[in-house]
Amino acid sequence: MRIDELELVCQEAARGVAQRSSRPLPATIVLPLPGATRVTALEGWPDDDDDRGALLARFAQEVMGPENAPCYGFVAEGVAATDAEQPMDVVVVAFGARGHHPRITAAPLHDDGVGEFTASESLAPAALPFLAPLQRAVDGAGPPDAFAG
């Protein structure tokens, strides 16, 4: 899967999460795997970045490692500043893949769904530090088994 394809898969997953979930949206992991895309809402999302990192490290060890996941997406609700100085509720999508620096995009959350996503950009090193275990997991993933059934 190319990085632009990963972005589209994660954006579609974000739209689905917004459609099926109450607000605030649950923090959700998207794992595009060879057999199917796995979308997992994380229960009890902590407020502290260290606790978030620990939760995602456990997820990476228990789920991503055994699946040899080469890419991931992360979906959550957030608040963005606008030119009008008024905060706006958004759905945030961060995604990464083996050998690629993580990227981020966002779209406004409306009562009737998700608006248009912004152009993705490189995730700043200090932004969303709790995602590091997911990126380490995909960077450690091996190549797919060409002979797997």
Image: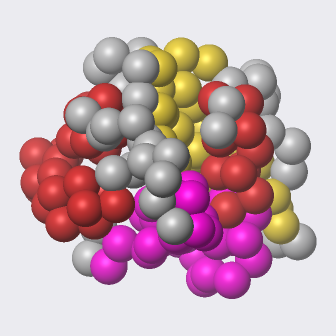
Residue at image point 50% right, 46% down: 146
Count numbered badges in the picture.
0
Query: What is the x, y in percent for residue 1?
Result: 65, 38
Left or right of 53: which side holds 141? right
Query: What is the x, y in percent for residue 104?
Result: 57, 31
Placement of 136 over or under 51, stated as above or below: above
Residue 121 makes an appearance in the image: yes
Placement of 131 over or under 89, stated as above or below: above
| Front-lying residue, 19 or 6 | 6
Residue at image point 71% right, 51% down: 9
Left or right of 134: which side holds 76? right
Q: Identify the image quadrant of residue 5.
A: top right
- Colouring method of the image: secondary structure
Q: Is residue 11 magenta?
A: no
Q: Does the magenta stretch include residue 25?
A: yes
Query: What is the x, y in percent for residue 16?
Result: 72, 71
Query: What is the x, y in percent for residue 105?
Result: 65, 34
Residue at image point 47% right, 33% down: 97
Residue 48 makes an appearance in the image: no
Residue at image point 67% right, 62% down: 13
| Front-lying residue, 110 or 51 | 51
Left or right of 54: which side holds 14? right
| Front-lying residue, 148 or 142 | 148
Placement of 137 over or under 35, stated as above or below: above
For the record, the magenta segment spans 14-43
